[in-house]
Amino acid sequence: MSILPAEGVAFEFTVPVLIIGAGAAGLTAALAAQEAGAGVLVLERDAVPRGSTALSAGLIPAPGTRWQQAAGEADDPARFAADIMAKAGQEPEPALVDLVTRHIGPALEWLADRHGLDFSVITDFRYPGHSACRMHGLPSRSGEELVDRLRQAAESAGIDMLCEAHVTDLFADGGGRIHGVALRRPDGSEERVGCGALVLACNGYGGNPDLVARHVPSLSTALYFGHPGNQGDALLWGEALGAATRHLSGHQGHGSVAHPVGILITWATITQGGIQVNLEGRRFSDESHGYSEQAAAVLRQPEGVAWSIFDERIAGIARQFEDFRQAEAAGVVLTASSIAELAEATHLPLPALQATLEHVGELKALGRPDEFGRDFAGAAQLVPPFRAVRVTGALFHTQGGLVVNDEARVARPDGSVLPNLFAAGGAACGVSGSRPEGYLSGNGLLTAVALGRIAGLAAGGPAPA
Ligand SMILES: Cc1cc2nc3c(=O)[nH]c(=O)nc-3n(C[C@H](O)[C@H](O)[C@H](O)COP(=O)(O)OP(=O)(O)OC[C@H]3O[C@@H](n4cnc5c(N)ncnc54)[C@H](O)[C@@H]3O)c2cc1C
């Protein structure tokens, strides 16, 4: 992953706009750049575009959309921006938050009207930290459908896409202008493609253990649950070009991935009144804070695991999620008709487990917060049959990255921009700040789609700089 001198390099061919990565960011950028009038080529290392986008639930937060209006849901960009800033402790760059919250609604309506993506808004469940129902998804509520529909839209629009094309190096001149890229094909052959503008849409560095150890040390031993191809190439190239980076420790983690099978267990198991205990049978945190920050809390426990304990009522709620049904089918959601049976099934020490569950029961009955600050007021009691899953903490994706301006152009520390380099999605610094608790549900696809469209329009516009 190098920056090589462009002088004297011959390219097989040259395209006006070159995009690295065919996830939500890259495909959205491609559709926008082509609409702006430019010829576009998308380069994707995998045989079929998937990315972390396909692993996600495909839910994109957007304020003031026509779907919200039809549902009578009051919302606007300023309100959404306030939610993002509150979740991330006011850390994100306000101008970036303002930019993406204003652009995401029109971007979804454009994808629906121009490219036939059938979005609807989820109104029966409000995600923690969102002050309005603003999560939009396609009918199956899956990221796989989202990336497939974006790919089909790009194909229908006649956009060229080269899969199994792993970009290894960028060619740049002394002024930081990108002249083209080198890519490797599965047979080991190499090609060089020139470009007028380059969009980095190859996500973050969650799949690169060295970069995770450097920037997110609390999750250096965590399971990585995102796309393995996201190796931090955009970050490494940007750094070598002198680009500004920000919030590299920012990320989305998850403290509830069934271990060792690696199936996501919905956080509804906790928010609906469940708890997590360590192998000593003791609680160790305020689980209600959020699933992202709970990843590191679980990893700090003996053997880096915990047991999520809930009951059949909560399992009934969780069963609406495909992942939970898969976990049950895999036999990792244990059942116990008493605390003694639960201790036996989980191999947790009975006295400690019993004391923990009785204490939680008292807190719920009294409606009092516990020593960690969790407020159990209004929470239903856990009653037999109990359900339990052994879980660990996982890293989903990173949220720091290259600093971009209001055209998604990659900036230098002094605020000037690189001449023809753009970044979107996980390649760019997002709006989650530097801490795990800063991630508001949907921040990932928000910056993939909003910045993807902004980058595509600017890169494909009449006069890319
Ligand atoms: C389990 C899980 C659940 C999630 N749920 C949600 C959710 O519901 N809502 C939400 O907003 N976010 C969610 N996210 C986060 C979201 O998936 C990401 O933020 C988003 O998909 C990022 O999009 P992207 O286009 O930047 O990256 P990706 O979709 O990962 O696409 C990047 C592409 O670049 C390719 N690539 C990388 N390097 C190269 C290279 N050198 N050459 C060529 N190609 C390259 C990769 O193969 C990949 O296809 C979730 C993430 C995970 C892991």
Image (cartoon, rainbow, N blue to C red):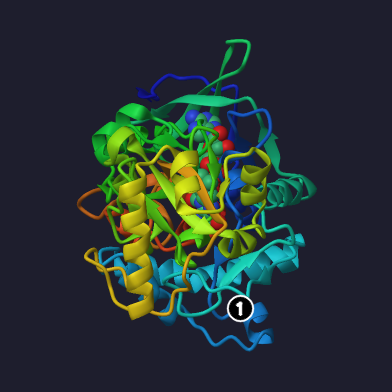
* Some atom of ligand 1 lies within 8 Å of the CB belonging to the residue at label 1: no
Residue 428 location (% of width, % of height) = 39, 49
Q: Is residue 354 visible?
A: yes
Q: Amino acid at mark 1?
A: Thr
Q: Quadrant of the N terminus?
A: top left
Image-quadrant location for residue 354 = bottom left
Q: Is residue 323 shown left or right of residue 307? A: right
User: Viewer-proximal residue, 48 or 378?
Assistant: 378
Residue 266 location (% of width, % of height) = 53, 55
Q: State whether residue 255 is above or below residue 269.
A: above
Find numbered disc 1 in the image and state the secondary structure of the residue it sits on: loop
Q: Is residue 452 visible?
A: no
User: Viewer-proximal residue, 128 or 387?
Assistant: 387
Residue 174 location (% of width, % of height) = 29, 32
Q: State whether residue 424 is above or below residue 90.
A: above
- Residue at 63% x, 72% y is 122
- Residue at 57% x, 40% y is 332
Q: State whether residue 195 is above or below residue 429.
A: above
User: How many numbered discs, if any?
Assistant: 1
Image-quadrant location for residue 159 = top right
For disc 1, the marked residue is 65
Q: Residue furthest top?
A: 188
Residue 265 location (% of width, % of height) = 53, 50
Q: Residue furthest right?
A: 156
User: Viewer-proximal residue, 319 or 112?
Assistant: 319
User: Viewer-proximal residue, 459 or 446?
Assistant: 446
Q: Is residue 411 shown left or right of residue 232? A: left
- Residue at 37% x, 59% y is 357
